[in-house]
Amino acid sequence: SAVAGPVSPLADKVGGKVELVGIIADSPDERDTTTRLMVRLDNGEKILVAASPYANYRYGDRVKFSGRLKRPENFTTEAGREFDYVSYLKVRGIEYEVSFAQVKILERGQGNFILAQLFSLKRAFITRLNRVLPEPEASLMAGLLVGERRGLGKDLTTAFRRTGLVHVVVLSGYNMTIVAEGIIIMLAAALPFGASILVGIVGIILFALMVGGGATVVRASIMAALALFARFTGRVYGAGSALFIAGAAMVALNPLVLRYDIGFQLSFIATLGLIYLLPLIEEKIKFLPARLGLRGVVATTVAAQIAVLPWLFYTIGEVSLVSLPANILVTPLIPATMFIGFLVGGL
């Protein structure tokens, strides 16, 4: 017979009004109409709390919140497919949520010191972007650079989705790779070889923590750290081996990502395409000029698109017919856009 797991003390309170106390355990997720808070109770349980978008919530705040407790429910997307929202939250350790919550800040600074400083740095950077850029450009840049998931509005988000460019809205594995390469280049110019490698690994880990550590970011960070470690030890870096090491480590830490995290699945499959399909495609498109990196951009875009196409259609239920040309046009602009964005936010 099956052995039942421990029953949450909140289970018999579902559907009723609750008043609970906990600590905001992640960077607040600001949307158009709400701010989503991941609150960890004293017993370790996590609850997703939807609060007012106008209060200045921070990571590490100890808060008291009240509202109607409920279990998450799946919903139907615009494509007519059911999105498994329950499993999406379960991967993140969340089984309950409170909407339209009344939230009161009791204390500040109750979280991890390092995470608090990283989130504070991110918040200051985003504030500077907002002073220079209008909306929705400021929100788009914040998502592109530091993974901020602020709302872009329904129309613009739909436009990105329909053109197959929704990965631009958030910090993807490709963007994380650009950040990692930037960190390595800057440190190599300022520090001795060994020190630049070690500091680079630490820098990549800290940046991944600051931007929220989503599945694609974690995968790209582990692979970048392994590449630096291989350079430090004088070993040959095998991208395929690094990918499977990163995937195995993530699944070992949280087995649910393998089954329920679409971001992890698509990132893993796309990287497989870049590793194993890219050489084959480059052979087929030698007629394209290599000038300005055109051949490389086309090859990498086609390889990633071909790899993810079946799984994307199976999980999401729709495929953009203009995704390939749109990505070929946009991809070369992303590194320059990120570089200018970091300068704007930094200066």
Image (spheres, grey):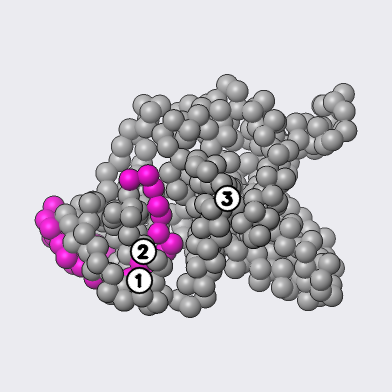
Residue for point 53% across, 37% down = 166
Q: Is residue 335 magenta?
A: no
Q: Is residue 17 left or right of residue 60?
A: left
Q: Secondary structure at mark 1?
A: loop
Where is residue 21 shown, x and y percent of the image? 24, 70
The label shown at residue 57 is 2
Q: Is residue 1 above or below residue 338?
A: below
Q: Is residue 203 left or right of residue 65?
A: right
The label shown at residue 132 is 3
Q: Locate the N terminus and report the quarter of the image it occupies.
A: bottom left
Depth order, front residue of 337/89: 337
Rate crowding at label 2 as few (under 14), some (14 to 19) or many (20 or more) other CA atoms within 10 Å.
many
Q: Residue furthest front?
A: 131
Start and end of the magenta stretch?
A: 4-33
Depth order, front residue of 339/96: 339
Q: Is residue 323 above or below residue 277?
A: above
Residue that label 1 marks: 61
Tell me whether the residue at label 1 lies in contact with that at label 2, contact meaning CB atoms closer than 8 angstroms.
yes
Amino acid type, label 3: Val
Where is residue 334 shown, x and y percent of the image? 68, 42
Report if residue 129 is visible in the image: yes
Where is residue 249 shown, x and y percent of the image? 57, 62
Q: Secondary structure at mark 2?
A: loop
Q: How many marks?
A: 3
